[in-house]
Image: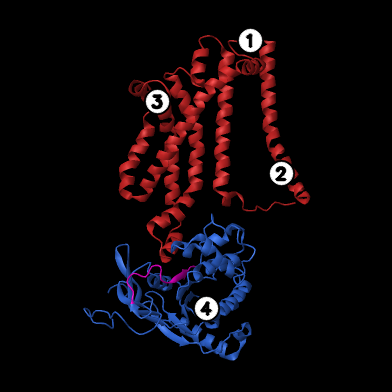
Amino acid sequence: MKRVAGDAPAEVRGDAKVRVEGVSKYMLQHGQPFAVLQDVNLDAQAGEFVSLIGPSGCGKSTLLNIIAGLEQPSSGTLYLNGRRAEQRLGTVGYMQQKDLLLPWRNVLDNVILGLELRGMSRRLARARALALMEQFGLKGFETAYPDTLSGGMRQRAAFLRTVLPEQEVFLLDEPFGALDALNRARIHEWLLGLWETLHKTIVLVTHDVDEAIFLSDRMYVMTARPGRVQLVQVIDLPRPRRLEMVTTAPFVALKAQLLAALRQEPAAEPRDGKQ
Amino acid sequence: MAPRAAPYIGRLRRLIGSWVPAALIVLVLLGLWEGYVRLWAVPKWLLPAPSVIAMTLVVSRKLLLDHTLVTFVEVVVGFGLSLLCGVLLACGIAASRTLERALYPFVIASQMVPIIAIAPLLLIWVGYGLTPKVIVVALTAFFPIVVNMVDGLQSVDPDVVNLLRTMGASRWQIFVKVQVPTSLPFLFSGLRVAMAVSVIGAIIGEWMGSSQGLGYLMIRSKPQFLTERVFAAIVVLSVMGVALFVLVGVIEQLAIPWRHNAPRQRSL
């Protein structure tokens, strides 16, 4: 712990869009406390694309849940837009691996859900969504029910639903995990194109090194339980990124380096859960 | 819409295909019944032939219609009452642990007490007429509605609930926009069962004491050895029950279009 107990966290700190400071999360399992996250520090600047990578069970999703406000950290502080944020629900866009489209709503009414919950009239929200249908490859499918769509289209619809409320920050939890390689490569390029026009901050959780390098400005490599930040790697590949780049020397060198970091991660320490 | 005609013909053919076997079985059974009665000259008061029952349906149509309307009203009003109470009760039970603990035992207990035992009491308390029948119908029908609706309201995907929370949704918004639509297919399963038992409930209610309705007509016709009229009443009752059951199914298709419009692949 960097901070001494009793030292109250500051109300305002820095200008990062997202700032996670000394966050730990403990949970109870069979009556025994164990650490899911330990002293995690992370920040994402305005317009930055940040990835979180690590083995399964390293608490990546828990960290996103904490940033989104679904869970509170056991200790540590969260800043959004440089301000301490206790109540964060509804302030960042969160997209999970499952598309979670509502089967009783057609595509158009699914994507306006966020706007509708904020009290916007359905008519206005639909008009806004219709303007973006083409860019998201959903034109012509406005009145289709989700069950009739392909996996890629469902993901794009879920993404449009995340984007429409125009939050500053998007959290993406393995959103492409369920797609096959070809669709993934396509959606990566498409996502980057979109991100470059939106100028939003993205925090992406993934377990795919290629995906993380290809998309990000910076990468946080995490260790297995308890989740800690092991390495922060700046990805200084030029933008815009092209699919061909994945076979170039700088890309391959970065990948080798990151894979090594992921592999040499220390075995779970015996003092686990005793704190 | 000429090019669209082909699928409709196909659909019609499938519809006929699905009805023909059932219709054939019914016709064969009716034929055997008719033949048996005629060959052995079974007296009418013991077992009337289908042709005699059909005649009664035509000759006594006015009488049957009058009594059918009474039973119909009992069923519909009782069913409506059970729907209203059942849905409200289910919402309460699903919304609050405390309410669940407080109310569920009574909901279950209400099904353990035989309706036959309650019906005579109802006669004493609220007299003859429509009210006791409606209460009996509602008592039999509300249980499947409550149980299914509660299951439906509680079967929401917690990830979807969390998604809405990250969008800043209130508890009420989650209830209206996720829980209620999720529960609809469950509710309709309950409604179909409820509709079937509603008809039985109405007849039981009438048997306990009444001066009109199909159940009353059966009770009155039996000692008069008008067995063919008892059968005619049963036929009308069955038709009414099936029609109401089908109606619930139709409303379900309209209310849950996403469940029925998903294209299913069929080989050509």
Label 2 vs label 3: CA separation? Answer: 45 Å
Can the viewer see residue A71? yes
Mark before the other along the chain sequence, 1 or 2 = 2
Q: Could you confirm whether marks 2 and 4 are on the same chain? A: no
Magenta residues, dominant SS class: loop
Depicted B83 relative to depicted A77: above or below: above
- Residue B185 pos. (x, y %): 51, 47
Shown colour of chain A: blue
* Subunit under mark 1: B
Image mark for residue B11: 2
Q: What residue type is labelled 4?
A: Leu
Badge 3 and badge 4 in a common chain: no
Residue type at the position of mark 3:
Pro
Per the model, the C-alpha gap separating discs 1 and 3 is 39 Å
- CA neighbours of label 2 inside 10 A, class few (<14), some (14 to 19), many (20+): few
Look at the picture and state if A238 lies above or below B247: below
Spatial separation of the CA atoms under disc 3 and disc 4: 66 Å
| Residue highlighted by disc 3 | B132
Marks 1/2 same chain? yes
Task: Say yes or no: labels 4 and 1 on the same chain.
Answer: no
- Residue A92 in magenta? yes
Mark 2 or 3, nearer chain start: 2
Q: Element at badge 2?
A: helix
